[in-house]
Amino acid sequence: MNYQRFLGSLVVIGALAVPALSQALKSEHLDNPSGLGAMQANWSTTREGDPILSWIEAQADDTYNLRYAIRKAGHWSEPRTIIAKRQFFQHPAEAPSITALNDGTLLAEWIENPKKGSEAEFLYLSLSHDGVKWTPPVLAHKDRSMVQHGLASAISSGDHEASVFWLEALQGEDGPVALKRTVLSTDGKILKEEALDPDVCACCPTSVVKTAKGLMVAYRDHTASDIRDIAVLRFENGKWSTSKIIYPDSWKINACPTNAAATAAKGDHVAVSWYTAANNSPVVKMVSSEDGGATFTKPLLISTGRAFGYTSIVLDDNGNAIVSWLESSGSGNAKILARQVSKAGAAGPVVTITEGPRESLGYPHLLANGKDTFLAWAGVGDAKAETARLH
């Protein structure tokens, strides 16, 4: 299939369906307190709504520290260390995260290599009630075998609990890989571990949001015929829904793309962006929902050229989506792009955040925070993590 003809037809269809936004986003560099060699930068917020930037920092003995800083009234706190001298799994898709729970407790999750040189991944959790002292790390999974337990996402799921979603590959990546959930209390006790889908794509990240009705987790599904499309599960009224494909791309690939969906929600307004290379046409798409993820709109094409994916999405206070992704800029390089999509589905102009070698840009992450939108991505070489403000 001719890629440019396919892409052009989607652009025309999108233009006929809804008028485009005329105002382009603007991007400006934002200083941050990460140190040299910082990687896997990620965003979250405190219970009060202040931005948290987390990252891992290399140490002289070939170990890494997990650190974070909080931004209040335009100023950064001094960086704090959550855990030191650990063997973090360093793939861009496995960025550690910090989640603020309902009572203000902070939950940190990260992935480590339990054995040097091994491809095994162990998922660790730690809690802090004051942001300074952190509990000793605990494993999020019962299984201790040298296989993958990773690609996690976490969320506050009750008054005194959190839910962590992750993948478990008991038979390796070639065997069925399960989507699982671990529930833990704010005092650090593991309350439950449950399997949600017995066969998912082995190395694609999970993404979870809270809607007015409950939780919605998005992930890349997998079938016996190697179709790998994006699916969602909803947890409402104490029960899980059946798995639902948000749009049948019918992407058939006998490999794992390490490239999945991003989600955002405000009330029952939900937005999902994702990457697919179905029909040999690599693009980033987006759908939205007004019923908490029970039904979705038809996809809107977000990318404008040959996409690499690694998308992130947020919703602003007006319900407009801001989407970021990686796209080819030629000669093996990539660029981080972003654009706004109105709640009505009007796609605005594309802004280029930065360009560089594809592998150096990592897996960028967005954060919507009041009138500001922030983006974080990997530094190049020994550089710090990079951050920008979009407005």
Image (cartoon, rainbow, N blue to C red):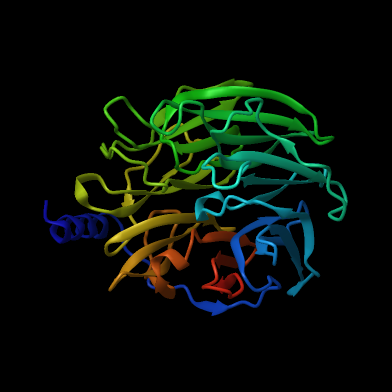
- Is residue 203 rendered to the left or right of residue 185? left
Q: Seen in the image, is 274 located left or right of residue 32? A: left
Residue drawn at the location 61% of the way across and 37% of the way down: 212
Q: Residue 253 in the image: state x and y as whole percent.
A: 27, 39
Residue 128 drawn above or below residue 373: above
Residue at 53% x, 24% y: name it.
196
- Would residue 292 be visible to someone looking at this image? no
Specify the quadrant of the image occupied by residue 52.
bottom right
Relative placement, left or right, of 171 versus 332 is right
Q: Can residue 2 be seen?
A: yes
Using the image as rendered, state which of residue 113 and residue 301 is in the foreground: 113
Quarter holding residue 121: top right
Q: Position of residue 333 (x, y in %)?
A: 34, 71
Q: On the picture, is 125 further left or further right than 253?
A: right
> 334 and 6: which one is in front?
334
Query: Which part of the image, by quadrant, shows the C terminus?
Result: bottom right
> Which of the 4 quarters of the picture holds residue 328?
bottom left
Residue 160 in percent (x, y) is at: 80, 33
* Residue 244 image offset from top left, x and y in percent: 41, 29
* Total marks in image: 0
